[in-house]
Amino acid sequence: KSEPIYMQLVQFKVVWFLVLAALLFVEGSPMQNGVYHHWEGVTVAALVSFTVKGWSTMYLLAILDSMLKNIGEAFSVLVIYFISVFHASFDDEYENETFITVMVVFLSVVAYLAAKDVVAKAEQYDRSQLKGGVKV
């Protein structure tokens, strides 16, 4: 955290670019057909969406703690699920099992965060009950 956020992002993206370039050459077909072969408007929209999400996540991760970032990620999964179900351009239908799975992930993260304070208070109570290694 001693380096500024823009330096952290540049370091991360340079390594990411090198790994992607290596994978491009190993896989081979993008080099033959062209990297953007079969790209459509939906693909470009997904690229823009994931780019914005990635940069904002990296920024938030540098500023916030990892648990708040996990709540944001879990909430975004919930929002994406609702968009895919209720938006007119998607053919997905509401499935109770999928919704429950998404909610379990979201609520697990929230419950873990809520439990941190309770666990800290319990540890403090346990320490106050111990004197010299013997429980009073």
Image (cartoon, rainbow, N blue to C red):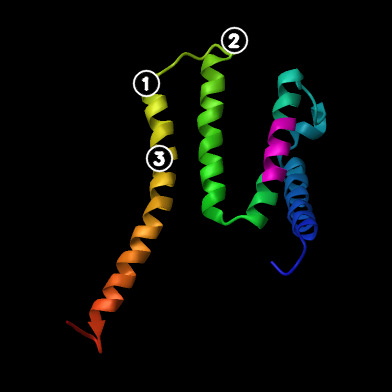
Disc 3: which residue:
107
Res. 40 visible in picture: no
Residue at image position (75%, 31%) is 48
- Is residue 111 magenta-colored? no
Point out the frontmost of discs 1 and 3.
3
Q: Marks 1/2: CA distance? A: 19 Å
Q: Looking at the picture, does residue 57 appear above or below residue 5? A: above
Q: Name the residue type under label 1.
A: Asn
Q: Position of residue 31 (x, y in %)?
A: 81, 34
29 vs 66, nearest the viewer: 66
Q: Name the residue type under label 2.
A: Ala
Q: Marks 2/3: CA distance? A: 27 Å
Disc 2: which residue:
88
Please report whichever mark, 1 or 3, sits nearer to the chain's N-terminal start: 1
Numbered marks: total: 3
Which element is circle 3 on? helix
Report the magenta residues as a range.
48-56
- What is the chief secondary structure element of the magenta stretch? helix
Disc 1: which residue:
96
Residue at image position (76%, 22%) is 39
Which element is circle 2 on? loop
